[in-house]
Amino acid sequence: MALNLKTAGIDGCKAGWLFVSFDENPFYEVLRSEEDLLSKLQEFDVILIDMPIGLEDEAYTRECDRLLREELGSEYAASVFSPPIRPALHAPSYVEASMQSYEYTEKKLTVQSWNITPKIRILDRFLTKDESLRVKVLESHPELLFRNLNRGMIFQKKNTKKGLRHRLDLISEYQPVAVDFFREIKEEYRRNEIAEDDIVDAMVLALAARQSAGNGFKTLPELPEMDSNGLIKAIHYL
């Protein structure tokens, strides 16, 4: 990859989507509408996003999620949600989505997965309609990126002050501006709009996207498959 590519990380939040770029002129932005999100997806060249891309039709768990849980270990496996299967993606309610999931997989959809389903729908629609987005909007997982930044070690969870600070320190080793971004976003937005862990997650995704220039990504699984809509089912990491 050329070093002049435009790179970014995106994490979903209550306010919409937190967008961070650590390119030559680092910046962050809260994308509150679908139109704002699509504009950024089209504008940038490499985007890591913490949101499921590529869905199963009948299997409850994607292979990439199973492998990711193994990588993170039992203590952190709960941070990996199995997204809805495609037949349940557009269900009008949690009850109906869970029933459809059970019909195909004999397992109900979790409430955590249902809570992010509206955002999965949006991203799925954009990538299904525009093939050019599929090669540059890539699914990743912040905890895997943090673990690798910390040389493969798992440390305190990010819902603790110590765990949050450790993650911010890891990012700021490479991008000192991360400390300012963290403070500014906390001051500018309420906790019920953007949580502290949303901030560090978006920033580590942006860091990995930037570091991928010239190196590319590895994936879980190593040889990923496409789903029935042509979207890749893989977790990307450095």
Image: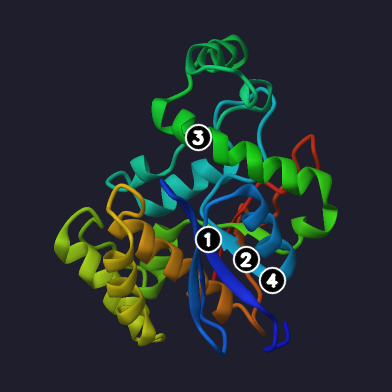
Q: Residue at x 67, y 52 (%)?
A: 35
Element class at badge 1: strand
The answer to whether residue 71 is left or right of residue 46 is left
Q: Position of residue 40 (x, y in %)?
A: 66, 64
Which residue position is annotated with label 3?
A: 82
The image quadrant of residue 140 is bottom right
| Looking at the image, residue 227 lies above or below residue 73 | above
Which residue position is annotated with label 2?
A: 47
Quarter of the image with the C terminus is bottom right
Residue 10 is labelled as 1
Q: Residue at x 43, y 60 (%)?
A: 142
Look at the numbered discs 2 and 4 and tell me whether their residues touch, using CB distance below 8 Å.
Answer: yes
Marks 2 and 1, how far apart in space?
Answer: 7 Å
Which residue position is annotated with label 4?
A: 44
Element class at badge 3: loop
Q: Earlier in the sequence, mark 1 or mark 3?
A: 1
Q: Earlier in the sequence, mark 3 or mark 4?
A: 4
Look at the numbered discs 2 and 1 and tell me whether their residues touch, using CB distance below 8 Å.
Answer: yes
Q: Amino acid at mark 2?
A: Ile
| Camera-side residue of 220 and 22 | 22
Q: Residue 136, can we see it?
A: yes
Element class at badge 2: strand
